[in-house]
Amino acid sequence: MNQTLRSTTAQVATTITRLLLPAWIGGATLFVITSVAEQRFPRFDSTIRDQLAAVRFPWYYLYCWLTLGTATVTACLAATLKPTHDRRKALMVAILTSTSLLIAIADYTLTYQPLLKLITPPGQVRTENFTTLHNRSRIVNEIHLTISIAATIAACLPQPSRRPIHPPQHK
């Protein structure tokens, strides 16, 4: 790949990463706000809350795979294509997004899927296992979203200039 194409591809990948990471964080935040509101709404009984969770969470994870997953791919692509002297920040963003995505995949597999079985059919009594899994999911999601926020901040901070700074020359 010639240098111009490589540089352009890295810039496009970086831009996509910068757009998708805040989209993921905003979407996840909105999801949490809506979920808490639904859980606190007094007219929703346990059966309705279980049904809402069964309907909402697959969309949450799909949105995660589409936004965070794509941001991870583009961050890794940018880190691979950037020149060696300019790769440090891109590599950090790629590592952070990859870590966050792997945590989200583990949460889906090890926590969400078992939780879904505990609320299907809806309206079942909350067991100790449910409480343990629910608390684990909350903590794991806080960790992976915090890592996503760190990746977003790193991705969006301006790159320091590599040009040498020379004092103005007076004649």
Image (cartoon, grey):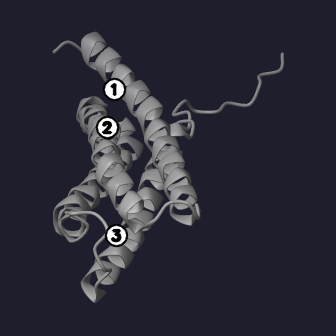
Q: Amino acid at mark 3?
A: Ser
Residue placed most toward the observer, 101 or 132 = 132
Q: What percent of the width, then of the height, locates residue 74?
A: 29, 32
Q: Residues within 10 Å of mark 3 (few under 14, many from 20)?
A: some
State the residue position of label 2: 75
* Marking on residue 13: 1
Q: Nearer the viewer, mark 1 or mark 3?
A: 3
Q: Check if mark 2's residue and mark 3's residue have beta carbons within 8 Å.
A: no
Which badge, 2 or 3, comes first in the chain's sequence? 2
Q: What percent of the width, then of the height, locates residue 149?
A: 49, 52
Which residue: 20% across, 12% down?
2
Separation (CA) of disc 1 from disc 2: 7 Å
State the residue position of label 3: 137
Q: Is residue 144 visible?
A: no
SS at circle 1: helix
Which badge, 1 or 3, comes first in the chain's sequence? 1
Q: Residues within 10 Å of mark 2 (few under 14, many from 20)?
A: many
Which residue: 31% across, 68% down?
123
